[in-house]
Amino acid sequence: GDHIVEQHVHNIDIANWVKNAYPVSIQGTGSRAWRTGKEYGEIYDNHSLEMTYADGTIIHSQCRHFEGISNRVDESFAGTKGKVYLSTDNSGELTDYKGNKIYSHDRKGNANPYQVEHDELFAAISKGEFKFWDAERVAKSTFTSILGRYATYSGETVKWDDALKAENSLFPDKLAWDAKPKLLPNADGFYPVAVPGKTKVI
């Protein structure tokens, strides 16, 4: 859980899509600055990641849940010849480093992408077509966000291969309606919260 896995995974997925690869390691930081009450369980309210890919590329990705601040959900990538900006409103822009626009999209005429993906999926299912094979990519992007959470919770640089081989499990001892989770609140109702430098994740 935590919003890095539940929400920010979509932005991490875009980073992996742009790279057409997955990070070999992640280091990061996070904390509970705003949501500190017991009603928030054990999650952080901010995460900042530095994801390193096999070719040496580093992508920085961050998310936060604060009140009363400016909010953005978008992506910006810099390459050797220019940069690209992608917005959740479906607009985007490619520019070179002299400020010249190479391409700009103002989203006019765009259908809602969230509706389109459902329309295409449901149409394929109704026709018996096997058009979409996203399971591996979805699993690996989800694992990337879990790796990011490991990094922010522990304060360590966490390697993909090490985390993949780890035998730790967050599952309860048995899968049943009355099963107890691994972590339980104390007598005051507070769950244990990860402390970077002290919390071990793998």
Image: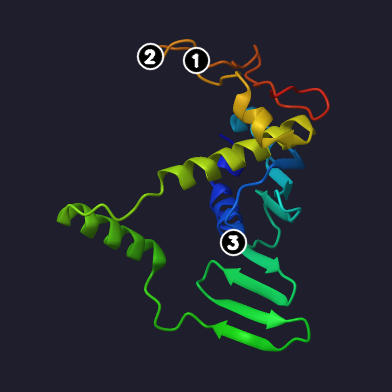
Looking at the image, residue 120 lies above or below residue 149:
below
**Disc 3 residue type (three-letter):** Val
Q: Pointer 1 and pointer 2: residues touching (CB < 8 Å)?
A: yes
Amino acid type, callout 2: Ala
Within 10 Å of the Cα at label 1, are there few (<14), some (14-19), or many (20+) other Cα atoms?
Answer: few
Q: Position of residue 56 (x, y in %)?
A: 76, 53
Q: Residue placed at 63% from the left, 64% from the top?
A: 75
Q: Residue at x 64, y 21 (%)?
A: 191
Label 2 to label 3: alpha-carbon separation = 40 Å
Whole-number angstrom distance, CA of label 1 to CA of label 3? 36 Å
Q: Quadrant of residue 101?
A: bottom right
Q: Which element is circle 3 on?
A: helix
The residue depicted at 41 percent of the width and 49 percent of the height is: 134
Name the residue tied to disc 2: 176
Determine which of the numbered discs, if any, sits on residue 18 in the image: 3
Q: How busy is the neighbourhood of tag 2: few (under 14 within 10 Å), some, or many (20 plus)? A: few
Res. 34 in view? no
Residue found at the far right of this picture = 197
Q: Which mark is residue 172?
A: 1
The residues bearing labels 1 and 2 have C-alpha atoms spaced at a distance of 9 Å
Of labels 2 and 3, earlier in sequence is: 3
Query: Residue 108 placed where, x, y %?
Result: 44, 83
